[in-house]
Each structure stands twice: as structure tokens, then as C-alpha cells.
Image (tube, rainbow, N blue to C red):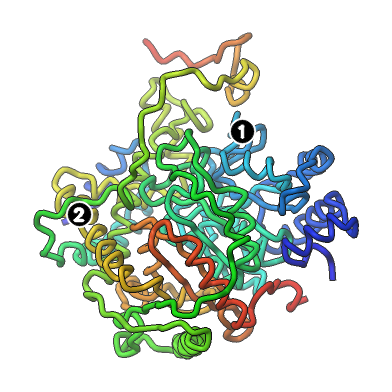
Amino acid sequence: MITKDKLKEYAEKLMFRLEEEQYDTLLKEFDIILEQMKLIEDIKEIDGIEPMTFPFELDNVKPREDDKVETIDTEMSLSNAKEKIGTEVKVPKVVE
Amino acid sequence: MSYLDLSIEEMHEAIINGKVTPEELVKESLQRAKEYQEEYNSFVTITEKEALDEVTKIDNNDSYLYGIPCAIKDNLSTKGILTTASSNILKDYVPCFDATVVSKLKESGSISIGKTVLDELAMGGTGTTGHTGIVRNPWNKERLIGGSSAGSCAAVASGIVPFAIGSDTGDSIRKPAIYGGIVGFKPTYGRISRYGLFPFACSLDHVGCFARSVKDIAYVVDAIKGHDEKDMTSLENDNVKYSDLLDGDVKGKKMFYIKEIMDINNYEGEVDKELEEVFKNFESVKEKCRELGMEVCEESIDIRLLKAIFSTYMTISCAEATSNNSNLTGIQFGPRGEGKNIEEIMFDARTKGFSELIKRRFVLGSYVLQKENQEKLFLNAGRIRRLIVDKFNELFEKYDAFILPGSSSIAPKFQSENIDKLSNRYLLLENHMAIGNFGGMPSITIPSGKIDNMPIGICITGKAKDDLNVLNIAYALENVLGCKGQIAGKENK
């Protein structure tokens, strides 16, 4: 049974909030989602089947060497920072 | 007739023979982009300055893409150019590197004229959820173009550019291509590097492209495919040039369609004029296939598996998306939120940065990953994915490809009533293209006709790594379907 409180709990785990009326919309949407999910639950002959996590076996995957291959300069690395002091990113104080 | 309306091959010849310059092509493309922007909203950013600068520097005139303008979906990183994924949470993000596909386009001499609108974070199929507004269908502005690669499709369909880059997780290239009357292709998983693509669902995400013909698609894929050490799922090079090998010789090829999807009796109470026309069109496509010397057979697949495709797709993709987007916190990426501690700052950034639709998809992802649901939903979706892929791979032992309509209707109107999401029409006909993502199979859509002057099309999907075969079947077929090279604006204006 899905309730609004449950939906809030799921959203909080992903660190965002919705408006109250948006939870109402979502609750209605879940009526259909749960029906759709039954289509998964209806298929019983799945014992012993390994869940598929990639489209096919990737046979050329090998860990790469831990080499420094690319670097970016200071100016570029600071280009997305909201605030900076010299060559450092300024962040808000969060430690009491 | 403008040179910009020709095929890539014809444009290339015109450039080489000095009939048109890359600069003229790029300027005309930019002019169209600006002129159509208000009508269709294809672009987040039109990169006029960068394009005009770049076109003076190119020198690789051996490449078929030399001097050819293109557009790039705004979820592919472009160094020094705003890349937003059409989301408020990335509205100011400027990457410090190019995606591999972007680097390869630059090496080929193609000139990007802009970054295109998508459904926010590529999670949607309507082209209506980007943070800069809805994308309209160039065939009819009251209708949507589909998504998520909405702007890339609209830019090609309206004749702004001859090709554009997109990404496809469930059908995000192929469905809009159907609605836009152009060709959409996602090759085998790993054929084109995903380095620099903002991930939605890594096990399903593909980079692909739009163009106005299969041959044009082949030229583009030749330029952007290839092994990339920066992408651990990248395939080894296949060392062939698709554009050289397309010959249209498909005599003796065998395709199948799925009985349960093409049985009109499975749509009782859901049949309207458009569905009837889609079925009629498919019959004529089958006939053309046979005239080309191909065999088209009917195969039966457990309808419960087929009806579970959409739920399986939603379960896997939403679950993967919650993880992939966990770095959008306002700290690593995105506008900084407000709050007294890190947790509050992240909550604020994510609450303000994501739209309602994205949050609803994330909640679904969170739901299927809850401890009590992991086994019965998330892991079972992975098991059903395997059952589906195994079944198709078994059929590929006998067949070269399968063929189905790409949609059950023409592009819907913006205000149309939502289709019943539990109907067979929705579950069987509207969502089967995700099969190609489950198995990483090469899959292409080509236009096959029109209903009320709106395009419809078909989808051809083949065995993983058999890209050339799929392209060649589509190449042969488009030559007899009469929809090759169409541009919406040229017929409507």
C-alpha cells in the first residue's frame, strides 16, 4: 500500500522535496505504476535467471593504468565555481 | 533549392567543386536556426560565434563531413560551451572538456551550430519538459516532436542542419525521428563512445544520430564511431566504413515481425483511423520488402513478456537514474542551495533544481530500490530483460532483423488526451523499441508514409554488432518507400 507519507520518505532519501499537491499527483500516478509493476510480478518463470545488467558480455574491459593522462588548468577548473578567492573555490561555512 | 537541403554526399561534392563554401553553408544554417527558433525551439544555445570561428580553421577536406553544419544534443559535453541537459540544475554549467563524439566531429571538419533542447536530463519522451520550453513539430506546430532528443530531431526535420547527434535510452532518437519524418539510428551499444554524455541509465544509454537518409546516417556514424579508452563499455573498432559498403542488395535477407504486436484483435476498443492507417502502411512496407527479395515472417512471443517491456524499462532506467544523478547536489554540480549545513544545502539545490516530472521519476526509482522491492521489482526486471533479450537473440539465429511500426499514431497534439498507459496500444505498440536498448542492438527508424500530412515510420532492429546489416536493409527499403530526404518546412511553407 503506497501512502503519501511513503512517497515523502522515498523523496527524502533522494534529498529533495515536492509540494503537497505534487504528492497528490504522484499518488494518483502510482495507481497506474503499481498496475504496470504487476506485469513484472506476473511473470513467474524467472527462477535461477541472473538479472541482466549490461546488454551483452563486454569482452574488452580491462582496468586502465593509473596514469595521469589529462589535466585542466586552474582558470578552467574555477570557471564553474560560484565564488572564488584567488585560485581557490570559496564555499559557505557549514561547520558549527 | 539551397545546397543545405541536399544530401551530405551532394553537399560534400559541391564544397569540393567550389560551388559552395563551408562558410556559406554554416551561415545559412545559422540563419535558419535563428529564424525558426521562436517557432520550434530546437536550441538551448545557438553557437554562432564559435561556429563562424571554427569554420575558418577546418582543413580536413578528405572527410565527407568537412564543412557540413550539425547540431548536438545538450547532454553532450562541449568544452567552453554551456551544456544544460535542459535542466535548471545545470542551467549555468560549462564543461571543461569535449565529449568524444564532439571531438570526433571536430576532427571530421563538421561545424556544430548549436546545442539542442531535450526532455530534462533525457528522461522523457515528449520534448515538452526542457527548462527552456517545449519543442514543436516542424510538420505541425500544434503537435509535439517527441523526445528526449527533441531539438536535434526538429533541427534536422526543419532543414536547419542535415544531421544532428542525439542519445537513446528507450527510444529517444527513434521515436522523435518517426514523428519528424526523418531517419534516426542508434548503433550497437558501445559502437559510439559515451564519454562526455550525461548518463541517464548507463546500461541502456546509447549515442546515435538523426539525418534525412540512411546514407547520410552512415557518413555520420563512420565519423563518430570507434573504440575509446575513456569509455569502458566502448567496443573494439569494427574497421569498416558503412558508407562504402551500403549496396542495397538485400535479396535473401530474412526479417520477422511480432504476431502479438501486429494482431489488430489485440487492440479491441483501442482502434481508430490512425491505427488502421499504421497497420495498412505496415502491410505495404512488408510488400515492398518482398519485392526487394527479402522474406518477412511472423513470429510469436509470449505476450506477457511483451507487455512487461515498458515496466521493465521504467524500473531499470529510473533506478539507474537515481544513482547517476546523485552528483547534482549544488555542490559538485548546479547552483548552490541555501542552508545551514551540507544536507540542507543539497536538499535546497535539488528541490529547486529538478522539475516535478523528474522528481516523480526519481521517486519511482527510489521505490523500486527499497529493500522490500529490490528482489520482486528491480532484480526481476533485470531477469525479464534477460528473458526478452535471449528470446530475440534466439530469433536472430534464423533472421537478419525484425521490423515493426515505430508508433501507433502520428505525433500527438500537445493538448491531446493522454493515452491509457495500461492499454495494449501503449504497452505493445508504443514501447517495443526499448528491446533494442535492453540488448544493445543496432536499431533504425525510417519514414514510411504519411497520415494527414504527418509522417509515420517503421523500426528495423538487428543483432548486436550487426550494424551494417541493419543499415543496409534500411538503405534498400528507403529507396522504395518514397520518403527519403524530406524536409518539413519545404512542404509546409
- Quarter where residue B266 is shown: bottom left
Q: Which mark is residue B377?
A: 2
> Does the image show residue B208?
yes
Given the image, what chain letter belongs to the residue carrying mark 1? Answer: B
The image shows residue B358 at horizontal and vertical percentages of 42, 49
The image shows residue B188 at horizontal and vertical percentages of 44, 55
Relative horizontal placement of residue B364, taking residue B11 as reference (left or right):
left
The image shows residue B473 at horizontal and vertical percentages of 51, 72
Q: Residue drawn 38% across and 68% down?
A: B431
Q: Which of B326 and B180 lies nearest the eye of the viewer?
A: B180
The amino acid type found where label 1 is placed reads Val
Residue for badge 1:
B94
C-alpha gap between disc 1 and disc 2: 37 Å
Mark 1 closeness class: few <14, some 14–19, many ≥20 residues within 10 Å: some
Q: Residue drawn 32% across and 73% down?
A: B398
Image quadrant in which the C terminus of chain B is located? bottom right
Q: Is residue A3 above or below residue B431?
A: above
Given the image, what chain letter belongs to the residue carrying mark 2? Answer: B
Image quadrant in which the N terminus of chain B is located? bottom right
Q: Earlier in the sequence, mark 1 or mark 2?
A: 1
Mark 2 closeness class: few <14, some 14–19, many ≥20 residues within 10 Å: many
Q: Secondary structure at mark 2?
A: helix
Relative horizontal placement of residue B429, taking residue B278 as reference (left or right):
left
Q: Which of B448 and B355 lies nearest the eye of the viewer?
A: B448
Relative horizontal placement of residue B325, taking residue B117 as reference (left or right):
left
Q: Secondary structure at mark 1?
A: loop
Q: Which mark is residue B293?
A: none
Q: Is residue B332 above or below residue A75?
A: below
The image shows residue B58 at horizontal and vertical percentages of 79, 41
Q: Residue drawn 34% across and 36% down?
A: A15
- Quarter where residue B28 is shown: bottom right
